[in-house]
Amino acid sequence: MNPYKLCAQKIKEGGVVVFTGAGISRESGIPTFRGKEGLWQRYDPSIYATMPQTLFTFLSHPSKITNFIIEFYEILLSAQPSPAHRIISQLEKAGLVKAVITQNIDNLHEDAGNNQVCEIHGNAYEVFCIRCGYIEKRDKDEVKKFIEELKNKPAKRFPLIKFVLDFMGKCRDCYTRLRPNIVFFGEELPPKEIVRAKQLLKECKVFIVVGTSGGVYPAASFPYEAKQSGAFVIEINLSPSFQDIDDVFLEGKASQVFEEIFSFI
Ligand code: NAD
């Protein structure tokens, strides 16, 4: 049988969980961080995305970190959901997709209209309190304004630090300083999101893995857990990351592949 038609049939039975990585946002204009054009080619993640080094660099050389913040958010802010994001959202509205588990922090699943999104690596438009776990959302327009202002800030150390910290704010409950709700290298994943993801892995009937290299743990074990729970595993990627357990591997760009599957639904 045509593999796209087979996947459409499976999806039509419902109970679908979609698991996404950086590849799905590639067509939205966000490069995968590790790729040739990725951010980590120019910014060493051990300095820019690893606590406490990042905090130390921010306090000692704030402009180093703010230059990175500007470039990072300019990429994120210019991105729009791709056709793949939009089809997944339509499938949720149709009651076929139960939830999306994503490693991405770009908010594009929510922008596309998905309500059930489990973000295991955080969200770049949120700040959170490490003491009590309180999370606050930052509007995209607010972030855009902050980035524009940051670009015009003189590189004087203390005013720059204060400007960034003031934007992040303090916890409304315990007044602790808020920090970006992004999981840095080596940090623990948000426990609530992990519990939710694990439940979804147990319950799903179809597990669609999109655009992930499977290089980041524990996310890389999710397809195996879903398979063990009896899910039909579909992988969409330029080359397979989970060949050993894929029931169907669909080679190609996420949007093209989703459009092809959707034509049979
Ligand atoms: P990765 O960079 O390790 O791998 C990307 C995968 O996407 C590769 O397997 C590649 O073949 C595939 N791919 C590239 N273009 C594609 C396309 N058009 N369609 C389908 N697949 C495509 O990404 P990862 O496995 O998600 O791990 C990277 C980590 O970095 C994650 O933890 C993630 O949180 C973070 N990250 C997030 C974003 C974002 O929020 N958009 C972007 C880059 C990295």
Image (cartoon, rainbow, N blue to C red):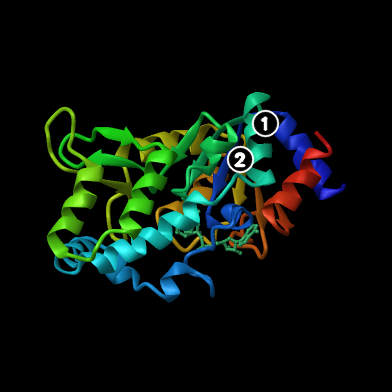
User: Counting other residues with Cα less than 10 Å from the Cα at mark 1, is it few (<14), some (14-19), or many (20 or more)?
Assistant: some
Residue marked by disc 1:
90
Determine if residue 123 is in view: no
Element type at marker 1?
helix
The crowding category of the residue bearing disc 2, from other C-alpha atoms within 10 Å (few below 14, some 14 to 19, many at least 20), is: many
Of residue 180 and residue 74, the one placed in the foreground of this image is 74
Residue in view at x 68 percent, y 24 percent = 94
- Pick the residue in front: 49 or 57: 57
Instruction: Find residue 180 and report its horizontal and vertical position in percent.
Output: 29, 47
Q: How many marks?
A: 2
Q: Position of residue 121 (x, y in %)?
A: 39, 49
Q: Is residue 24 left or right of residue 154?
A: right
Q: Quadrant of the C terminus?
A: top right
Whichever of labels 1 and 2 marks the residue nearer the N terminus, that label is 1
Q: Nearer the viewer, residue 258 or 229?
A: 258
Looking at mark 2, is its residue's CB closer than 8 Å to ligand 1?
A: no
Quadrant position of residue 109 = top right
Three-letter amino acid code of the residue under disc 2: Ala
Question: Element under label 2?
Answer: loop
- 254 vs 3, left or right, is left
In the drawing, what numbered circle is on residue 171? none
The x, y position of residue 26, in whole percent, is 59, 58
The residue under the point 25% across, 66% down is 63
The label on residue 231 is 2
Q: Is mark 1 within 8 Å of ligand 1?
A: no
Is residue 145 among what the camera can see? yes
- Tell me which amino acid carries mark 1: Gln
Image marks 1 and 2: residues in contact by CB distance under 8 Å:
no
Point out the frontmost of discs 1 and 2.
1
Q: Residue at x 61, y 40 (%)?
A: 231
Residue 250 % position (x, y) = 73, 55
